Image (tube, rainbow, N blue to C red):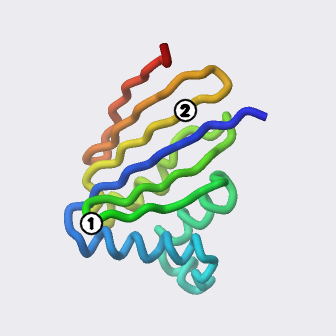
Amino acid sequence: MSQNSNTLLLFFDQEASLTNCLRIFKKIEEGTLEQTEEKIDSLASVATHAWSEDWFNHGITESSKYLRIDYDSSTHYEFPLDVLEELFKRGLKLACLEVFYDQIGEFGQFYFMDKKNHFQKSIIP
């Protein structure tokens, strides 16, 4: 079965914004996010849905400057736009998404700045 391998880098305007979003993603990863938090917090809600329904083989790497989320997805899954929309509301300044399309052997690179989408597609030689 073919799948896409994704790497999402998230850059925030302030360290506090990065820390807050990291806390939410870590709770989702550990399975410790409470249902009340998910219902109240829109980021927690959409991120939990993506994490459990659309993404698999996922992991988070933290840095003092960015968050990195690696995940696989089906070949029909496009972009995590609902997650990015919520992150932009919380201080996200730039998101870089690299997708390896296993089925066709191509990489795609996508940049999201100030809620705008910038595409650049690369083909593996």
User: Residue at image x 27%, y 44%?
Assistant: 113
User: Residue at image x 43%, y 77%?
Assistant: 23
| In the displayed structure image, the side of residue 50 where residue 86 appears, left or right | left
Question: Is label 1 in a helix, a strand or a loop?
Answer: loop
**Foreground residue, 18 or 112?**
18
Q: Position of residue 46 (x, y in %)?
A: 54, 63
| In the displayed structure image, the side of residue 80 where residue 53 appears, left or right | right
User: Residue at image x 62%, y 37%?
Assistant: 4
Image vertical order of residue 46 relative to residue 32, above or below: above
Question: Is label 2 in a helix, a strand or a loop?
Answer: strand
In which quarter of the view is residue 86 placed? Answer: bottom left
Q: Residues within 10 Å of mark 2 (few under 14, many from 20)?
A: many
Q: Residues within 10 Å of mark 1 (few under 14, many from 20)?
A: few
| In the displayed structure image, the side of residue 62 where residue 93 appears, left or right | left
Q: Position of residue 117 (x, y in %)?
A: 35, 37
**Foreground residue, 39 or 28?**
28
User: Residue at image x 61%, y 61%?
Assistant: 51
Q: Position of residue 43 (x, y in %)?
A: 47, 68
Q: Which mark is residue 9?
A: none
Q: Earlier in the sequence, mark 1 or mark 2?
A: 1
CB atoms at circles 1 and 2 under 8 Å apart? no
**Foreground residue, 93 or 23?**
23
Q: Which mark is residue 64?
A: 1
Give the amino acid at mark 1.
Ser
The residue identified by callout 2 is 100
Give the amino acid at mark 2.
Phe
**C-alpha gap between disc 1 and disc 2:** 26 Å
**Residue at the extreme left of the image, as rendered:** 14
